Amino acid sequence: MSKLITIERHILEQQKNFPEATGELTDLLSDVAFAAKLVRREVVRAGLVDILGFAGSTNVQGEEVKKLDLFANDKIINAIGQHGRFAIMGSEENEEIITPPNNENGSYALLFDPLDGSSNIDVNVSVGTIFSIYKIKNSDPRKADISDCLQKGSEQVAAGYVIYGSSVVMVYTTGHGVHGFTYDPTIGEFLLSHENIVTPKHGKYYSINEGSYAQFNDTTKKYLDYIKEEDSATGRPYSTRYIGSLVADFHRNLLTGGVFVYPPTTKHPNGKLRLMYEGNPLAYICEQAGGRATDGRRRILDIDPSELHQRTPLYIGSEDDVRVAEEFEQGIR
Ligand code: P6P
């Protein structure tokens, strides 16, 4: 019988083993886990509660916002902001940064995508929350500003995601490995289910939207043609798996091995995915699990952000597979 370890207990254990982890970080991650429980409660009832359909508004990306997006966004901002542990927040759904009330004792910045892949909600496909935590640079939390959010991914102190799928799993890292917790609704706790996740160096899956083939650069087309050729010596052809929900595609590849590619396209010349809410947290997790994450050339965690909502191409997953994709992207192959 495996030990029943809640995420809160696990975070505390991490704190004991790694003195540099402060009690604050334990509280922050517990706050995120709490907010995830609130979001989960609605997501699993999406078909029953009048929260489906377009809320009618559009987010900063010009995308239709579904009510559950707004719900998740509000829940995370309020459930976490109320404790004053974060001096500042940035949400994929909010154009401007968010300053929580009574943030005078906050030492951290929270960047998050409240419900990524939300276009899949109505058809019961997994969606996810992604978060990233930084220590603020400003000595006075009350003066925390966007510069406390715009930090390189390598500065993250914690990152994670929650995937609302056949089960609800929360995965996090504080720089000491990657750990997954499955929600047990009978006791309302996230219980340790995937300790020390290590992603395979090579996988058999590739995830890319082939429907955008006409929008891809020639280097990307060449890569796609390559991975579909028959060659057992190099494990080709790969199998395609593309859900259209980043957290779901990332989580599967993290556990089984594989590569996710969202390259530059004519519609999104800088890629579609956001650096601060998607690229950085998932890159941190991926590297901590032994994988690799770049924009096709640069390590994602080394990119110096200039805008809160800036986008990036994303090549992420098993190290060997990402390197192959990069070699094509760079014209080496
Ligand atoms: P496309 C969902 O809208 C999302 O932001 C990610 O979750 C997903 O990986 C990607 O966009 C899908 O984009 O252009 O392939 O539909």
Image (cartoon, rainbow, N blue to C red):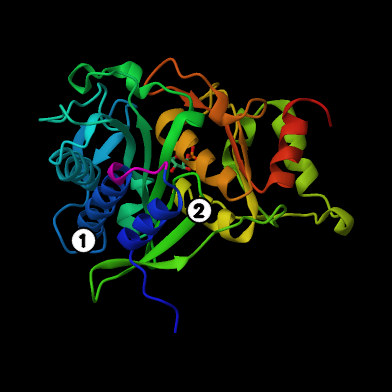
- Please name whichever residue, 278 or 86, is drawn nearer the observer in this view of the structure: 86
Residue 125 is at least partly visible in this image: no
| The residue carrying mark 1 has its beta carbon less than 8 Å from ligand 1 | no
**Residue 174 found in image quarter:** top left
Question: Callout 2: few (<14), some (14-19), or many (20+) C-alpha neighbours within 10 Å?
Answer: many
For the stretch drawn in magenta, the main secondary structure is loop
Q: Residue 299 falls in which quadrant of the image? A: top right
Give how far across and how far down residue 137 sits, in percent: 34, 20
Mark 1 or 2, closer to the camera: 2
Q: Residue at x 25, y 23 (%)?
A: 97
Could you say whether the residue bearing mark 1 is in a helix, strand or loop?
A: helix
Q: Secondary structure beneath disc 2?
A: strand
Q: Which mark is residue 118?
A: none
* Mark 2: amino acid: Val
What distance separates the C-alpha of mark 1 from that of mark 2?
A: 25 Å
- Residue labelled with disc 2: 178
Frontmost residue, 213 versus 2: 2
Q: Is residue 202 magenta?
A: no
Q: Residue at x 57, y 60 (%)?
A: 255
User: Can the viewer see residue 115?
Assistant: yes
Q: Position of residue 260 (x, y in %)?
A: 59, 44
Residue 17, image x, y percentages:
45, 54
Q: Amino acid at mark 1?
A: Arg
Residue 14 in the figure: left or right of residue 223: left
Q: Quadrant of residue 221?
A: top right
Q: Which residue is mark 1?
A: 41
Spot occupied by residue 265 in the image (x, y as percentages of width and height): 58, 27
Indicate whether 14 appears above or below 74.
Answer: below
Q: Which residues are magenta?
A: 20-24
